[in-house]
Amino acid sequence: MSQQGEISQYLITQYLPGTPAEELPADYDLLDNGVIDSLSLLQLVGWVSERYAIALDQIDLNPEDFRSVAAVDRFITRNTQVSVAAASGREGVAP
Amino acid sequence: MTLQPPADAVRAGRLPADAVRAGRLPADAVHAAARLAPERVAVLHDGAGTSFAELTAASGAARVALDGLGLPAGQPIAVRAAKSPETIALILACFAAARPVLLLSVDLGAQVAATLVERAGCAGVATATGAATNAGGAPFDWAPAPVPAGAPDLPPDTCLMLTTSGSTGVPKIVPLTGAAISRFTAWAAGAFELGAGTRVLSYAPLNFDLSLLDVWATLGHGGTVVLVDPDRAANPAYLLDLVRTTRPNMVQAVPMFYRLLLDAAAGAGGGPPVPEVRHVILTGDHTPPVLRAALPELFPAAVLHNVYGCTETNDSFIHSFGADEARDGALLPIGAPLPGVRAHLVGADGASFAGPGTGELVVSTPFQAAGYLAGDRFPVRDGHAWYRTGDLVTRDDRGRLLLVGRTDFQVKVRGVRVSLEEVEQVVLAHPGVAEAAVVALPDAAAGARISAVVRPRSSGLTGLQIRSWCAQRLTRAAIPAVFDLRDAPLPIGVTGKVDRARLKNELQKEHA
């Protein structure tokens, strides 16, 4: 499954049960439409961090990055690239 | 107990009752505090302090820009209530200019916001920019109302217009006079020891009536307001860190805040207590006993207060208690009426009664509105306007008042009052909906979880489409968490109405 498909699937399972995956547009506003509230935002951030191994303590969290499936997708892509780059820069150093 | 002399004088008509003079009262208090200690921090936001001198300078700049708009005297404006020192300065400028201000929640749908602006007769919407506390630049962005507003029918001396807390559809507008706000801030300062340098945590949005205490009573008495960042208001670690770093003397919040805070403290293995907190106010909903019991450990020096109030009347009852009562699991009473507050219980027969029993709580407070804007005025009896709270209250044999629940279909979602009937009306108004019922189930995190059970007219309608429809017409807390689309007709009960009890049962099983 594509990264975007995986994000859609998670959001639907957690917050939009019964919604067919193809019905959720990638740009659907999750915040304005009340799919994600302040509590579930934390949950979502936690899932993204765990699933994609993004260390949150080095990242400025901005709710805008979780406004839509496409935004989450961009956020993950951006931050996994950064950590890959950072990891390769520290080659040979024990974690 | 009597009211403060200035308030009494206003009520007795000895002070000029004209709108301009009284409308300045909340601004006068802040300016007086600024003259006494210009360097003192007025607002702490994101680790940075804004001094009283800086706040009043920013407010002065906003005042100049406001005057530059050339609006007719007394015509209201709307202000987007984003939580920042700049917004506080902008509101203060409106107070000082005797310009009534409608505070708009940042969560309002565009349609609802536009309707409110029109109903309140606002000339436009101002959104504070960061420029007010920096050099140069416009202190706020100005969006004139698309339709030139007609002459608003505001009560004289209207200072602030709040909207009914989180209610749905188009919220009702509650105009509050400067005199009523000043009477309230005077009471609050005495009750919670607000004074020069007192630090108060501001958890509620600026457009909530709770901010009359957290922000305006605090600033008016020379205290420091510690703003909680709304984007992180549900982040336990942030909240605990903020409380530990800023060490406020007073904290007022809905139960959810204390749950998050205590979760974080428990996660951190308890950690040191915060003895600077002297007053902890629980409001907005029942606080679960287990939560209450844990508070004295974190705040060992605090008196706890269960405060009952609403936007229309502001605070009306208080029950103050210590660690012992926090640890006993009994239901907290709503307590004693505040000075000047009158209350009675009305039974099912519509007559008020004395002695034990359950009825609707009807109150009259020195802090309240006389009615809704361009809507129902509260009935006046014995020279007082009485507000029907919609809350069922039991008076026990010891005379204590206990909150039982709502008389109608109102629930609280994340501390925000939501009328299920109004949500249902919005869903039913969608052209593709044949039948709908909206019910709420208890939810450990949010207080209540709203579900809309919908039978579409045709198969083309999706849950997301109805969700978007609702989002344009409801505040966020009122948007149902679940849209359950069904082909079969909704179950009908013996009264011929949709059988909500059965729907709730079915949903509970699905959710479990």
Image: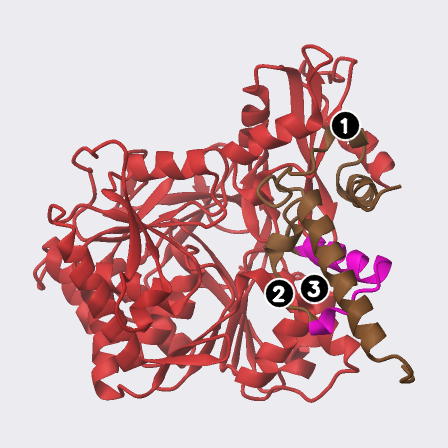
**Image mark 3: chain:** B
Neighbour class for label 1 at 10 Å: few (<14), some, many (≥20)? many
Question: What residue is drawn where x is 52% and y is 66%?
Answer: B203
Identify the element where label 3 is drawn. Answer: loop
Label 3 sits on what residue type?
Answer: Ala
**Image mark 1: chain:** B
Q: CA distance from mark 3 to mark 1?
A: 31 Å
Q: CA distance from mark 1 to mark 2?
A: 31 Å
Residue highlighted by disc 1: B503
Q: Which chain is red?
A: B
Residue highlighted by disc 2: B257
Residue highlighted by disc 3: B330
Marks 3, 1 in one chain:
yes
Magenta-tinted stretch: A39-58
- Chain A colour is brown
Neighbour class for label 2 at 10 Å: few (<14), some, many (≥20)? many
Identify the element where label 1 is drawn. Answer: helix
Numbered label attached to residue A8: none
x, y (%) of residue B490? Answer: 74, 17
